[in-house]
Image: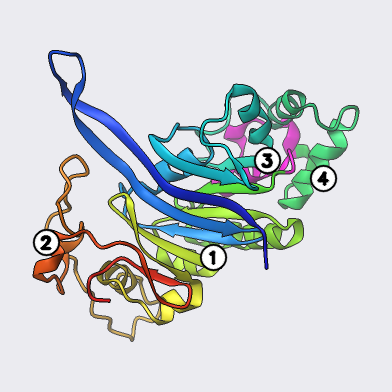
Amino acid sequence: MSQVVLKVENLNKHFPTGKRNLLGKHTQTLKAVDGVSFEIKEGEIFGLVGESGCGKSTLGRCITRIVDPSNGTIHFNGEEITNSGPQRLKELRRQMQMVFQNPHSSLNPRMTIRQTFAEILKVHGLAKGKEQERMEEILSLVGLPVDALDRHPHEFSGGQLQRIVIARALLVEPEFIMADEPVSALDVSVQAQILNLLVTLKEELSLTMLFVAHDLSVVEHISDRVAVMYLGQIVEMADVDELYQNTLHPYTMALMAAIPVPDPSIKKEYEVIEGDLPSPIDLPVGCRFASRCPSAMTVCQEQNPSLKEVNPDHFVACHLY
């Protein structure tokens, strides 16, 4: 059995918002992540998918401790890191790296790639005296020439920049990578190249990865297991083949129906999600999808369903099951 690299239990991230009362405290709370639990095994790519604003990026930032969670626990290689201090976090930064959505904003435009890489190696005390060899090795891994080191970010295309951001993450030999929508800002043809690169790197380097996206077709291509998130909670989670062949939650079904079909001769009927998206500041008492669900029942308005295992390793939060 594979070792569990990351374990998240009942994780929450609530942001105080709204006007302040007489005591200076905010009167409202935005529940971006609300009671999320899952685990990722060694060498696995775990896909996290959902609409924009569902909390998936916030969840990823909580896991890597870029954002402090409100409560819940995060275990990395068996160690609880939920409340780790600055010194321990610095050590964890080497083991847990991020690939951000927009490569343009995640690189310093004034620094060459060599300067960026050299600073990272210096901070972590790595490859002393062999910095050039390490930089060339990592660029080769992502399919870029050595002369890329002496160029600035604006001299690269979007796809090349994302390869550089991936190389930057791999530079410190991490065990875990949190990829936050790493292909959503790229052209479709370039997306395929980056996805194939990530799969190859995962196999060659035995990487464990949390892959965040809003496109189910992209997630299907790269993931081993998938969790579907809606308004701060996971509503369905299963192995990738099981999820796509035996979809259970009405929200996941609607996302599946929205996947474009490349053959124009095939006419596909889309299941449009009707109703308004509830506010994460004023969440309903019952199921958060009930106001938009075609199968909603009375109990859905009264009770928020918990995530249950309805088939082997297939979990769903829905009163239909």
Sooner in the amino-acid sequence: mark 1 or mark 3: 3
- Tell me the number on the disc at residue 301: 2
Residue 291 seen from this side: no
208 in relation to 224, above or below: above
Q: Nearer the viewer, residue 83 or 181?
A: 83
Identified by mark 4, the residue type is: Glu
Furthest residue toward right: 129
Identified by mark 3, the residue type is: Gln
Sooner in the amino-acid sequence: mark 1 or mark 2: 1
Q: Is residue 52 left or right of residue 44?
A: left
Name the residue: 71% across, 51% down: 142
Identified by mark 2, the residue type is: Gln
Q: CA distance from mark 2 to mark 3?
A: 43 Å
Residue 95, horizontal then vertical, whole percent: 68, 40
Range of magenta residues: 148-173
Q: Quadrant of residue 271?
A: bottom left
Number of other residues with Cα within 10 Å of mark 4, as a class: few under 14, some 14 to 19, many 20 or more: some
Residue 70, horizontal then vertical, whole percent: 38, 34
**Label 2: which secondary element:** helix
Number of other residues with Cα within 10 Å of mark 2, as a class: few under 14, some 14 to 19, many 20 or more: some
Tell me, yes or no, whether the highlighted magenta stretch contains residue 28.
Answer: no
- Tell me the number on the disc at residue 95: 3
Sooner in the amino-acid sequence: mark 2 or mark 4: 4
Q: Which residue is mark 4?
A: 137
Q: CA distance from mark 1 to mark 4?
A: 26 Å
Q: Is residue 13 left or right of residue 31?
A: right
Name the residue: 83% across, 39% down: 134
Q: Which residue is mark 1?
A: 223
Verify CB contact (< 8 Å) between mark 1 and mark 2.
Answer: no
Residue 116 seen from this side: yes
Verify CB contact (< 8 Å) between mark 1 and mark 4.
Answer: no
Identified by mark 1, the residue type is: Ser
